[in-house]
Image (tube, rainbow, N blue to C red):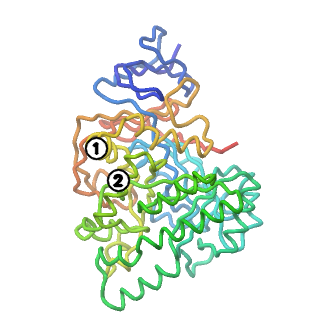
Amino acid sequence: MLDLIIKNGEVVLSNGHKRVEIGIKDGKISIIAEKITEESKEVIDAAGQYVLPGMVDTHVHISEPGRTEWEGFETGSKALAAGGTTSYVEMPLNALPATTNKKALDLKLEAAKTQNYVDYAFYGGLVPGNLDDLEDLHHAGVPAFKAFLSNVSSDIPDDFENVDDFTLYKGMKKLAELDQILCLHAENPVITTELEKEFIREGKVSALDYADARPVFTEVEAVQKALLLAKETGCKLHIVHISTQEAVRAILKARKEGVDVTVESCPHYFAMSAEDVEEIGAYAKCQPPIRKKEEHDKLWDELLNGNIDWLTSDHSPCTEDLKTDADNLFEAWGGISGAQNNVDLMFDLAVKQRGLPIERFVELIATTPAKRFNLKNKGEIAVTKDADIIFVDPNQSYTVKREELYYKNKHSAYEGRTINCRVTKTIVRGNVVFDLENGIVGEPIGRLMTNK
């Protein structure tokens, strides 16, 4: 007997979307057929909705332990579940200590194991002084590593630091030996830091000024450096949250020349321009910055032309005072709380408004990141895969309201925005964890994923 049958939905498979039924047993997809005759303990009717694989979000900041007042595993994973994410990979910052050695990883593993509503994994970090820790983190099962070519250093002990060129080179050589992926935040740290100081001295502190203080070339230059080192070392490279067409073009050129490189971007770079940030304020501040309308439109061209590999939230929460107490945009915390509005927002913008094929949408949110990170049971609706499934109703509209957010700190750059579709159900390994009518369902069932 099956545990669950999903029927009457428009199911998005790797070869197209069609009206089929899905049979689930022991957390796995066991049958896909036009009509399942086997008995089941439960049947869920998905009439009028698309049935998709859940989002695999490979760029999430949770902040536990150490900065749990910003976001914890419980609240963060609830928001992910409500937004249609069924598994995520958590960044090695903003928790304290940063996840740059096995001891710090063990602290995070212990904190996470009973609190997650969706499945999870953890990055290791590459920072000055931890080259000897990379192998231990690799053997502990981290699916990838993260480094910064932008300035993230602080005076707080055990906080994350950006890499110098020598650490990046030696780290990439080591990660190539381990057959690991390096994920890189690419912005020139010296030029952006000094430009920001100059703009502040001159009193140029608006959202448009902030975008000008981190100009396109500072992203492109850092990307080009990383691509050159990847070519030299043979390291597998993934460039995170790209915001400019020119950087995407540089990545595509390197890929044609044999560099093993992929690229992601985020919903906020498509949902907003810097002109919108002028209205929204610090809730929409991030790095790299949300670009002006002309560059924003060019990035859309790259997404629609198939040149961006996948989408992530870059959910980077903080307490509200870090957004509201600053005198200018430059002083506010740089990060957007976005985990609860990934799937529906981009489905609306890309599929409904711009005609992106829904099969390509599924690749962007699930299939491609799962393959790149070697998460073998995730990312598609197929027999033997984990039954990580979401329902999307293309005919529902709703307005993002603060009181409906699951974040520990209930603020969002999307507050007040109307989204013209909605995630109505999220299923993790055959278990309903979110339902639009009932909210979060049951106790945390999330499990650790590794690349082993």
From where the camera sits, is residue 319 visible?
A: no
**Horizontal relation, residue 124 to residue 12: left or right:** right
Of helix, strand and loop, which one carries label 2? Answer: helix
**Viewer-closest of 233 and 70:** 233
**Numbered badge on residue 188:** none
Q: Residues within 10 Å of mark 2 (few under 14, many from 20)?
A: many
Specify the quadrant of the image occupied by residue 205. Answer: bottom left
Q: Quadrant of residue 268?
A: bottom left
Spot occupied by residue 367 in the image (x, y as percentages of width and height): 51, 38
Q: What residue is drawn where x is 46% and y is 79%?
A: 192
Task: Look at mark 2 in the image and give the residue it sits on.
Answer: 300
* Residue 206 percent location from the top left of the image: 28, 78
Q: Left of 222 or right of it: where is 75?
A: left
Q: Residue at x 57, y 57 (%)?
A: 254
Residue closest to the eye, 143 or 357: 357
Q: Amino acid at mark 2?
A: Trp
Instruction: From the image, tell me which residue sits under label 1.
Output: 354
Rendered position, 10 above or below 179: above
Give percent across and percent down for residue 95: 55, 65
Label 1 crowd (10 A; few <14 / some 14-19 / many >=20): few
Percent position of residue 185, x then y:
53, 65
Q: Are marks 1 and 2 in contact (CB under 8 Å)?
A: yes
Quadrant of the image occupied by residue 125: bottom right
Which quadrant would the C terminus be assigned to in this image?
A: top right
- What residue is shown at x 57% (from left), y 68% (from top)? 148
